[in-house]
Image (cartoon, rainbow, N blue to C red):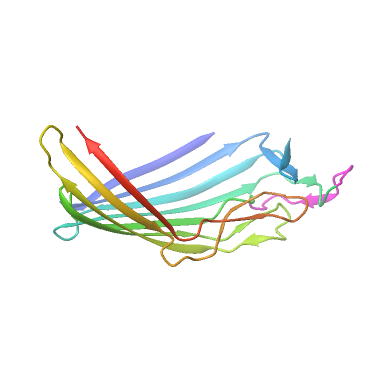
Amino acid sequence: MQRELGLKWQPLPALELEAAAFRADSRHELAVAANVDGRASYRNVGSVRRQGYELGLSGRPVAGWQLSAGFTHLLAYYRDGFTTCAAAPCVTPELRIHAGAVLPGVPRHYGSLRLQHGGDLGWRQGFGLQAVAATYADDAHTARAAGYALLGADLGYGWQLAGIDRLELSARVDNLADRHVVGSVIVNESNGRYFEPAPGRTLMLGARVVF
């Protein structure tokens, strides 16, 4: 069962705010029972609830600048208790996970912010920020990946040429500060190798033709 309630509000002609609250309940949730050397096994663990809210802001607060921001709060937890394996090999599940335990691999908070100056033609500059909260890597909550925030920047130029609408060249740098963070987790990895690193500083070049 899923329920959602949302609204949009335009406090200024060039600014729009969106908000939504949601709740989704599932039965016979399929969860990772164990993950050994990249081979995952799954089992049904009863009911799970996911609930939270989303906020979004977009518009042009200042002439020439575009703003886009978002924030998500998500609480996902088991509504039924179950037993699982603490480590491999495991013949009989013996680790008890109680009702109310949050799901591993699901950050509780996520946020993004982007500012851009310029339009389709001429110079365009942009700056972005992404932030992710800490997340557990296993059902027992013995391992946790730290939260992080990453900065990015981009630069582009657009020309209007005969025969086409425009030509765009761009350059983008992600993880501008070259931070070493956990990009993803392997849930319930039985050997304790839960964490996968995110890419370091990355440069991407692009070209786009619009007809």
Q: Which of 130 and 110 is in front in this view?
A: 130
Residue 125 appears at what percent x and percent y? 24, 58
Q: Residue at x 66, y 39 (%)?
A: 47
Span of residues in magenta: 89-102
Residue 159 appears at what percent x and percent y? 15, 45
Residue 4 is one of the magenta-drawn residues:
no
Residue 120 in view in this figure: no
Which residue is the extreme one toward the left? Answer: 162
User: In the rendered view of the protein, which quadrant contains the C terminus?
Assistant: top left
Q: Which residue is drawn at 28% across and 43% down?
A: 207
Drawn side of residue 49 relative to residue 202, left or right:
right
Drawn side of residue 149 relative to residue 75, left or right:
left
Residue 146 in view in this figure: yes
User: In the rendered view of the protein, which quadrant contains the N terminus?
Assistant: top right
Residue 98 appears at what percent x and percent y? 74, 51
- Residue 38 falls in which quadrant of the image? top right
Q: Nearer the viewer, residue 25 or 123?
A: 123
Drawn side of residue 30 relative to residue 63, left or right:
right
Drawn side of residue 15 relative to residue 51, left or right:
left
Residue 11 appears at what percent x and percent y? 21, 54
Q: Nearer the viewer, residue 164 or 90?
A: 164
Q: Which residue is drawn at 16% across and 61% down?
A: 62
Residue 99 is one of the magenta-drawn residues:
yes
Whether 176 is drawn above or below 160: the answer is below
Instruction: Count numbered badges in the picture.
Output: 0
Q: Residue at x 57, y 61 (%)?
A: 134
The overriding secondary structure of the stretch rendered in magenta is loop
Which residue is the extreme one toward the right? Answer: 91
